[in-house]
Amino acid sequence: MSTTRHLSYFKPHFKASKEFELSTPVVPAPHKFKRIAAPVSASPATGHISLGDSNKSTFAGIVPVHGIEESEKTEIIETPAAAGYYDEHLLTKPLPIKGQGTFGLQYVATGPFRLVVNSECHHSSGNEDVLVLEVGNDTACFRTRNNSDPANILKKVTLAKPDLGFEAGLKTRYWFSIDKGNKILRYGKGYQTTSLTLLEVNLGIEGSTPWAEWMNEVKFLAVAPSKDEDVVQFADDLDLWPFAVDEMSPVVVHNDKVTLEQLEDGSVTVVENLPPACQQLYANVTGKAIQLDEGDFEFSKAIHHSVTTEGCIGWNKLKAKAEASGHPFEAQYLRVTLGLNRGNSPGSPFVMEVWPPHHYSSVHSHSNAFAVIKVLHGTINSYYYADLDPTKEESQYYRQMEFHKDEVTWLSDRQLQTHQLRNETAETCVTIQCYQYGDHDHTHYEYFDYIEEGEDGHPSTVKAFAPTSDWGFSDFKKKVKEEWEKYQKEEREKV
Ligand SMILES: [Fe+2]
């Protein structure tokens, strides 16, 4: 997790032409490089090189031209191994396990780029066997060498979704997963979860291809942009995960509730599978005594009355929040905090949230914190998003779940972090949320970022929401109880 974020990279200072002279293949090649014999022309403005009619690949034809004179370019293109290779920026920290792991990069790309994994920590320069994810303008592919030979594209695609290309000028999380156990390469954008896989190749699908065996050896990583200006300091933006991309159910249950069928279909996960921070939060808020209604006081009915009756304290607070924010009344919910902010969570660690009928939140993330949420009353729907991306429509969620009374869900810095909650019923929903930063989070970003919908042709934007408190729990419960008892008395007197 965040322990692996503080990485460094190094890049030798010699130029591409010199670098190429130094590079020699060191890994036994499962196949020979196929020379591209097509005529070559270069665009001085873009550095893009056309390989002529014989090359119909969408991906081919871009080579790095970092500070190279025109005569030097010609020299490189005439050398087969360098045709269309991207200059590799080597990362000093390898995958923790050979042949297994997920390589995630938060990156602002303005042009195509490649992520390269190698069995050795040196430049392949297009003439060695490596595994390459190439992210292009509107498409992507996996290659077996860092060059632009169409023969090196892995074509046994088992999954391909739309919107494969780089997000021009937008900081985006791209990930490349290597799974030697299942012989699968995956690429996705957003959180590193199976649902967000955009492109998948199964190297074992045709039996024992050379690559299915060779992928067991890959360990070292490199980022290879096609544009000089896309070279960034990667240290704070890298995320190495020791496992191939995985997905756990948003539904958490105690292990004595899991059936064999659920083990098979993965529709629930058990507490022990959660990250340690979530296990701790789960213990705090899911005890049997954590209930809204107790004794003869129906707190849930009192809350519903308060937030749905004009003039009551709940309704008045929602109205005031709508007027202060300029957002619709239905976009408001109540945040009732429990206990003190101990400095290890965005706002108070325990928050009871009240969702009147048909009210909803914005699409928001959770400060990279961990959370466990239990439904105390009613039903809430959660819509999950790949990232907090203001260019995407609200309808572009990748997963939706409905949670009922006593059901528990979770989120982490790695999965389910960005969502929208909606009460789509006619009954008020009440949830208890519990937040905590991860052990290795030394930033403690105190805000929940959210997408504010643009109006009148203005684009949507990301804004920061300070998770403040509308009431303390004891004060809220006392006032709502008084209000409810007064209302019941008046009703009795009417009768
Ligand atoms: Fe949330």
Image (spheres, grey):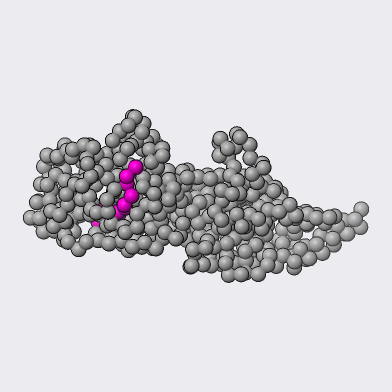
Outermost residue, top side: 206
Say which of 386 and 210 sits in front.
Answer: 210
On screen, residue 445 versus residue 488, left or right, reads: left
Extent of the magenta region? 216-227
On the image, the x and y values in percent for residue 204 come to 36, 33
On the image, the x and y values in percent for residue 425 come to 67, 46
| Among the 4 quarters of the image, the one containing residue 391 | bottom left
| Residue 428 in view | no
- Residue occupying image coordinates x 43% and y 45%: 244
Q: Is residue 459 magenta?
A: no
How many dots with numbers? Answer: 0
- Residue occupying image coordinates x 60% and y 54%: 279
On screen, residue 307 versus residue 348, left or right, reads: right
Say which of 393 and 6 sits in front.
Answer: 6
On the image, the x and y values in percent for residue 329 come to 63, 58
| Among the 4 quarters of the image, the one containing residue 302 | bottom right
Q: Is residue 220 magenta?
A: yes
Say which of 51 and 261 sits in front.
Answer: 261
On screen, residue 125 versus residue 397, left or right, reads: left
Say which of 327 and 474 sits in front.
Answer: 474
- Residue occupying image coordinates x 54% and y 53%: 275
On the image, the x and y values in percent for residue 8 come to 33, 62
| Residue 274 in view | yes
Q: Is residue 317 above or below residue 272?
A: below
- Residue occupying image coordinates x 14% and y 39%: 35
Outermost residue, left side: 71
